[in-house]
Image (tube, helix red, strand yellow):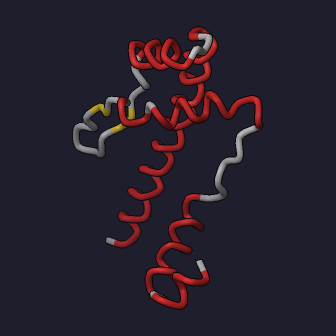
Amino acid sequence: MADLAEEEPDAAEMVADLLAEEGEAVDPLPWTRWAWRAWHALADDRQWRAGGMGPAMPGNIPWSVARIYAADHGLHFPTLFRLLRAMDAVHAEWWTDKVKAEQAKTETED
């Protein structure tokens, strides 16, 4: 970050602001990292639901994709799937809160 601040002061400030908005990074417990890696690896397979008049909302990672990932990596599928669903639920809640905060911010600016 120091190098970025030296080269591009505006970019460093923007990155710092984004990091402040997002909160601290998650540091998963060592015994959960296998599921954490799977959740991130499969994130691009997540479907997004149209939000109607609002923004799109993230769906769950599909069962079929999780099953294939578990088979390819020698993982216990029922455990992986349960953990993925739990992480998807937290992600959806976080996304909803983020959208609401952005909407409130936009409304106060108008």
Q: In this view, does 69 lie above or below 40?
A: above
Q: Which quadrant would residue 107 be assigned to in this image?
A: bottom left
In what quadrant of the picture does the C terminus appear?
bottom left
Q: In this view, does 84 lie above or below 3?
A: above
* Left or right of 103 on screen, residue 12: right
Please tell me how many numbered marks the rendered image carries: 0
Residue 33, percent from left and from top: 67, 34
Q: What residue is shown at x 45% (from left), y 87% (from top)?
A: 8
Residue 51, percent from left and from top: 28, 38
In what quadrant of the picture does the N terminus appear?
bottom right
Q: What residue is shown at x 46% (from left), y 12% (from top)?
A: 67
Q: Which of 61 and 32 is in front in this view?
A: 32
Q: In this view, does 69 lie above or below 26?
A: above
Q: What residue is shown at x 76% (from left), y 37% (from top)?
A: 29
Q: What residue is shown at x 59% (from left), y 67% (from top)?
A: 20
Residue 2, percent from left and from top: 61, 83
Q: Which of 17 and 98 is in front in this view?
A: 17
